[in-house]
Image (tube, coloured by chain):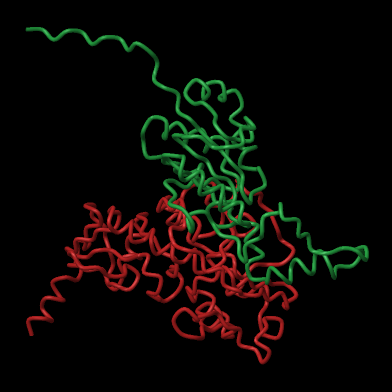
Amino acid sequence: MTTPAPLPPLQAPRKLKLATVSLAGCFGCHMSFLDIDERLFELIEHIEFDRSPLTDIKQVGVCDIGLIEGGLCNAENVLVLREFRAHCKTLVAVGACAITGGLPAQRNHMDIGAILTDVYCTRQGLSASCRIPDDPELPLPLNQVHPIHEVVHVDYFLPGCPPSANAFWTFLNDLMAGRTPHLGHGLMHYD
Amino acid sequence: MSDVHDMDDMRAAPGSPATFSLDGQDVEFQAGETLIEAATRAGRYIPHLCWHPDFHPHGSCRLCTVKVNGRAGAACTMQAAAGQEVQSDTAELNAQRKTLLQMLFVEGNHFCPSCEKSGNCLLQATAYQMGMEGPHFEQFYPNRPVDASHPDLLLDFNRCILCELCVRASRDVDGKSVFAIGGHGIHTHLLVNSDSGRLGDADMALGDRAASICPVGVILPKRRGFAIPIGQRRFDQAPVSQQTQGDGDSP
């Protein structure tokens, strides 16, 4: 008895949903992601952007992959990170700030109150009415900047400041193919 | 005594070089050599941080831990003996090394993007080699002020991994004993032997061996930032595992 030939799939595989956000970052990682240039067209064949600075969608939906740039420097960062964790099957810490706190964490050995007072009150050249901003819309700063894995579970880390476009490309291709991402020499960079 | 005879048996027999097996491949050694010395001479890589071919082994970083006939030991302190079965490049040992590296990274402030040593740093290159993508542990963010008091050298304690190479170089080569290690446990730290505790008041010169021995970015020459651009540095050229013969000082 011969086995029947497999039926061709009725439709192409579902596109993976990808959300990205920059918390306490500089958007450098996002810029480096865009540096994959024309490969974006190939990428868009396989993925669909959800919340991201590239789409301007404000609320993250249910996603397959979430890329987090930047660490946590204020209460809103923590809120957004928790939303991403709740909505993304695979959460990735992208870049030095998300992974180690990075440049914003260089303030960690100083008192946040002293920094705010120095910047907004006692620094030279300020007008007499200057005071620490206290608009209720402003998220409160954290005492210290933290990397994201200290608050939520992180599935993968993509290091670099920023990770190169090739590192993004290799990483995402591995992820889309269901492989454990592997960067190797030349793509793995902390700087 | 039978023990003595056993030791004799393990030494190199005249005429035929003695060998031990490293990950299944024979490595020749000379009498008195440690495992890492013989392996390095043969172009084989055993991960390490505190070991340097020019200095007496220190055995503190434990990164070179290998399994010799099934038992763990530091390759930098263990003498090679004929017939040893040494395992180094195994998933188990490399996972332990990665954990050690992660602990070293979170214990200090290793902010690679702003470090002049990035690309030439043995800690960073070894972490790349072991596939360390993230720190896993919580960051300590210790407060360690830099010492910029010396006219030609900068001391950034944030990056110190307590390998004691500068202590050994200053004491054994320069004959100055500018550096020492003080404190206990998590409070262990690098000290400068001067009345003020500052490098500017110590008998240290730019040409000293201790000034160029640091495997990380603690002891750096001033006014020499980015002479070689990021991307063209030592470990950008080839991974640390392919540079076993080049374990020299800072470029």
Which residue is at a point 61% across and 70% down the rendered structure image?
B219
Q: Is residue B133 above or below residue B8?
A: above
Which residue occupies the foreground of this view, B9 or B201?
Answer: B201
Q: As drawn, which residue projects farthest toward the front?
A: A136
Q: Is residue B197 above or below residue A148?
A: below
Instruction: Answer left or right for A75 relative to B48.
Output: right
Apparent colour of chain B: red
Which residue is at a point 67% across and 83% down the rendered structure image?
B198
**Percent position of residue B13, x then y:** 17, 67
**Percent position of residue B18, x then y:** 21, 63
Which residue occupies the foreground of this view, A47 or B62?
Answer: A47
Which residue is at a point 50% across and 79% down the rendered structure image?
B168
**Percent position of residue A109, x then y:** 64, 71
Q: Is residue A34 above or below residue A125?
A: above
Instruction: Answer left or right for A148 relative to B43.
Output: right
Instruction: Answer left or right for A162 relative to B27.
Output: right
In the image, the chain rendered in green is A
Quadrant housing the N terminus of chain B? bottom left
The reply to whether residue B217 is in sight is yes
